[in-house]
Amino acid sequence: MQPDKKALLFAVTAVLLWSTVATAFKITLTYLTPLQMVTAASGVSLGLFILILAKQGRLRAIGPEFNTHRKYYLFLGLMNPLIYYLILFEAYRLLPASQAQPLNYTWAIALTLMAALFLGQKIRKRDWIACGLGYSGVLVIATRGDILGLEFTNPLGVGLALLSTFLWAGYWILNTRHKTDPVLTLTVCFGIAFPIAVVASLIWSDWSNIPWQGWLAVSYVGLFEMGVTFILWLNAMKLTSNAAKISNLIFISPFISLLLLALIIGETIYPATVIGLMMIVGGLLIQQWQRRTRVAGEA
């Protein structure tokens, strides 16, 4: 198979899997608490990353990598997966998934703002347009279209969903200054977070009455939200000769996700949710267009 066709296959598979995670989150939350979800899913993901490194013959690299950047990894591991996913899962617990999932897509807009603040990158006119359009979409979704009334369906849930986007953006900003292989980085981060999550969950939760459906659902989250999908996407980006074409596929995911939420768990998809999501995606597309225009100009 040609590299570009293989890249497209990897990317489409990743997008389809990402489209299922909002549904998987809500199903899992009927059996587990957010802390239990983080603990079990992190354990599954960590096992996957260790298997990948073992297959590559790089298990011995984990210890030296951690020892060389100990403070960095302690901070990064607490941020992701522990704090980020705790906040994200709590947002999904408080909100309908059809609201939480589109709000989570504003992380790319949050990344622009944080890059300006912490990396000194300039925010251009199109960035401000994208931010305005994206966060207006958030407002439409959070108020179910009643913008003038400003009556949020669940202010805490909306706040946590937005906070999670800034945590995720912060995680990626920290990664820009660290050039280690992503799988090795994730293995160390999850290796730090998992035992802390285990101890916390043993203190503050009860594992005794979780049915097999809960274990199956959280294993799916660990494999496909935190693990396999990330690897597929990295491989797609490495193999493709047109990164923009591949990256634009991600914008299909939230719309498929809304369809699955309606069909599988019966969530009501409000017109305001679709309109707000289109505004958010529109803002993200403006950012993508800016990058392509800039690259074309430099060429």
Image (cartoon, rainbow, N blue to C red):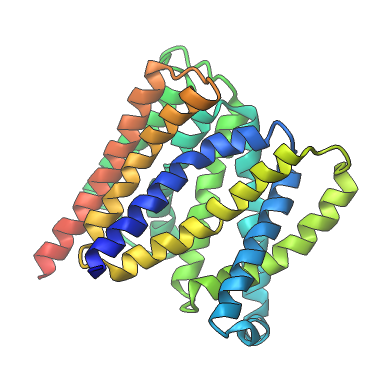
Residue 113 visible? no
Residue 87, percent across and down? Answer: 64, 43
Residue 250 visible? yes
What residue is shown at x 82% (from left), y 49% (from top)? 201
Residue 185's place in the image compared with 156, above or below, is below
Residue 80's place in the image compared with 248, above or below, is below
Please state if 118 lies on the left or on the right of 39 as rendered: left
Residue 128, picture quadrant: top left
Q: How many marks?
A: 0
Of all residues, the one furthest to the front in this rendering is 1
Quadrant for the N terminus in the image: bottom left
Please state if 17 lies on the left or on the right of 81 as rendered: left
Residue 246's place in the image compared with 51, above or below, is above
What residue is shown at x 62% (from left), y 60% (from top)? 45
Residue 273's place in the image compared with 206, above or below, is above
Give whichever of 29, 115 is nearer the camera: 29
Give whichever of 190, 295 is nearer the camera: 190
Please state if 147 lies on the left or on the right of 185 as rendered: left
Residue 23, percent across and down? Answer: 54, 34
